[in-house]
Each structure stands twice: as structure tokens, then as C-alpha cells.
Amino acid sequence: MENSEEKKITEETEEAEAETAEENTEEKDPRDQQIEDLKAQVEDLNGKVDILKNEYARAYADTENIKKRLQNEFEQRSKYMIQDFARNILPVLDNCERALAVETADENYRKGVEMIVKGLKAALQKEGVEEIECLNEPFDPNWHQALMSEAKDDVEPGTVIEVLQKGYKLKDRLLRAAMVKISE
């Protein structure tokens, strides 16, 4: 009898296990599989969104850098756009100043040349061109070009004692170095 009871218990246990297995297979709803698929799809899409956000941030940064560079180039170009013209007009100004240095009997001629010189200087100054003051100043190779030197007892060595050709700067940039004679 014990055997039959054991058999009965074993059969009941097997039946219970079979029912549980059936319930487990029945509980596996197709919607659960869809939910799992959708979760995986969401994770994949979130990864793609992160990649696209990163690419967008890089593209935006590149655009901002290009914008800043172009703005800087525009400002530099605007600031120094007269540079070539000023370099070409400086010899004309030099010639007018040389003409003024020559003695003449015709006072109207002299006044006309003075007016031209004043007009040229005013126009250049309006655009930011300034003469480099260097007479009796220490020699500065950034602004001066030494063509000659002369020994002078009453002047400190390295001082500009004569300006052979005036130098000019455009705002903060050298336009033409002053050609000078310095003391030894």
C-alpha cells in the first residue's frame, strides 16, 4: 500500500508540475514579447539620439568657431583696409613735404602745396595713419630703420639724432619704418 500511496503522490506531483508548466506556457502572452521588443527598440533609439546630440553639438561648435573666425577676419580687414592705399600715398606726401622745403618766390605756390600736405595728412589721420615720432627718442628696431650712425658727445648712444624719412603706423601696425641716423 505504501507503494500505491507513493505512486499516487508521485502522480499528483507530476500532474501539478505539468499544470504549472502549462500555466507558464499559457502565461507567456504575445504582448509580453512585444513589450520586450519595444524596450529594446527604445534603448536602440536612445543610443541613436545620444549620437545625434553629440554630432549636433560638434556641428554647432564648428559653426560658432567659423562665425568667430570670419568676424575676426572682417574686423581685421576693415581695420586695415586702407593699408595698401596709405603705403602708396606716403611717397606723394613725402614729395610734397620736400617741395615745401625748397625756397620759392611764389607764395601762392607754397600755400597751395601746404594745403595739399595738410589735406593729405588730415585724410590719413582720419583713417588712423599716424607719423612715428622718433627724433631724440631711443632707437626702437620695431619702428625705426637705422641707416647711419654718428658719434656725438652730448647725446646718449642709441638715440635718434636725425630723421631721414618719416615713418608711419596704421593704428597699432607699422606702415613704414622711419629711416633714421642714430648716435654711437
Image (cartoon, grey):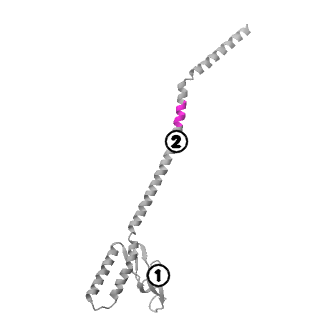
Q: What SS does tag 1 mark?
A: strand
The part of the chain drawn in magenta is 36-43
Q: Residue at x 52, y 25 (%)?
A: 31
Magenta stretch prevailing secondary structure? helix
Q: Residue furthest top?
A: 1
Q: Quadrant of residue 117?
A: bottom left
* Residue 157 visible in this rendered orientation of the protein: no
Q: Amino acid at mark 2?
A: Lys
Q: Position of residue 94 (x, y in %)?
A: 37, 82
Q: Is residue 29 left or right of residue 160?
A: right
Q: Is residue 41 magenta?
A: yes
Q: Amino acid at mark 1?
A: Gln
Q: Position of residue 74 (x, y in %)?
A: 40, 63
* Residue 15 visible in this rendered orientation of the protein: yes
Residue that badge 2 annotates: 48
Q: Position of residue 39 (x, y in %)?
A: 53, 33
- Choose between 37 and 103: the one closer to the eye: 103
Q: Quadrant of residue 29?
A: top right
Q: Residue at x 52, y 45 (%)?
A: 51
Q: Residue at x 54, y 24 (%)?
A: 30
Q: Is residue 25 magenta?
A: no
Q: Is residue 14 left or right of residue 35?
A: right
Residue that badge 1 annotates: 145
Q: Residue at x 74, y 10 (%)?
A: 3
Q: CA distance from mark 1 to mark 2?
A: 63 Å
Mark toward the start of the polypeptide (1 vs 2): 2
Q: Residue furthest left?
A: 108
Q: Is residue 179 above or below residue 173?
A: below
